Image: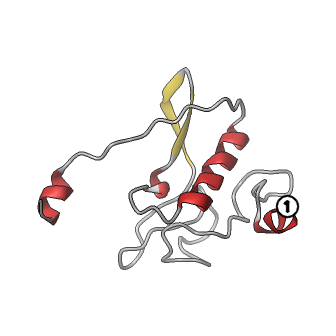
Amino acid sequence: MDATDAASEPRWIIHLPTTLTRLVEATALAVALRDSLGHVTAIDFGETTLSEEDRQFVRTRIWCDARLPGDARCPRPTDHDGACGGEGAGLRHRRDLGDLPFGANGKSPRSPDERRRS
């Protein structure tokens, strides 16, 4: 199979149910999965969406993922302020998650500072 054949093949989605009951918790889990599995090139974290168990057709995007120059994607949260890119522009899966739109202090529950303390 060459690159043309691979591009025409359908992509598969893994639906991974959780026991979490709040959007902020599900988002934090998606961030943790991206942190720990970001090196796996078969996973497209930029396309990650969340949905309620009984409303799976209503999906909430986590990351902007807009196309940037070259083959890069915007790694910032969806509905971010300002232009796409910014710090970490060009990286497919950004590690600095401090500007995700949740948490009492506006930071990811598992921010880099919290990881250093654990």
Residue closer to the observer: 67 or 113: 113
Q: Residues within 10 Å of mark 1 (few under 14, many from 20)?
A: few
Vertical order, 4 against 57 (above or below)? below
Image quadrant of residue 83?
Answer: bottom right
Query: Which quadrant does the C terminus fall into?
Result: bottom right
Residue closer to the observer: 2 or 54: 2
Residue flagged by tag 1: what amino acid is it? Answer: Ser
Query: Which quadrant does the N terminus fall into?
Result: bottom left
Q: Which residue lies at the image location 58% right of the left edge and 77% below the top edge?
A: 88
Residue closer to the observer: 89 or 32: 32
Is residue 71 left or right of 90 when viewed as pictured? left
Looking at the picture, how far across and down is residue 39, in whole percent? 49, 66
Q: Which residue lies at the image location 23% right of the left edge and 45% below the top edge?
A: 10
Display colour scheme: secondary structure
Image quadrant of residue 86?
Answer: bottom right
Looking at the picture, how far across and down is residue 16, in whole percent? 52, 36
Residue closer to the observer: 73 or 10: 10
Residue placed furthest toward the top:
54
Q: Which residue is mark 1?
A: 118
Looking at the picture, how far across and down is residue 60, in whole percent? 55, 41
Provide the secondary structure element on which disc 1 rests.
Answer: loop
Is residue 23 left or right of 12 when viewed as pictured? right
Q: Which residue lies at the image location 43% right of the left edge and 40% below the top edge?
A: 14
Q: Which residue lies at the image location 18% right of the left edge and 57% below the top edge?
A: 6
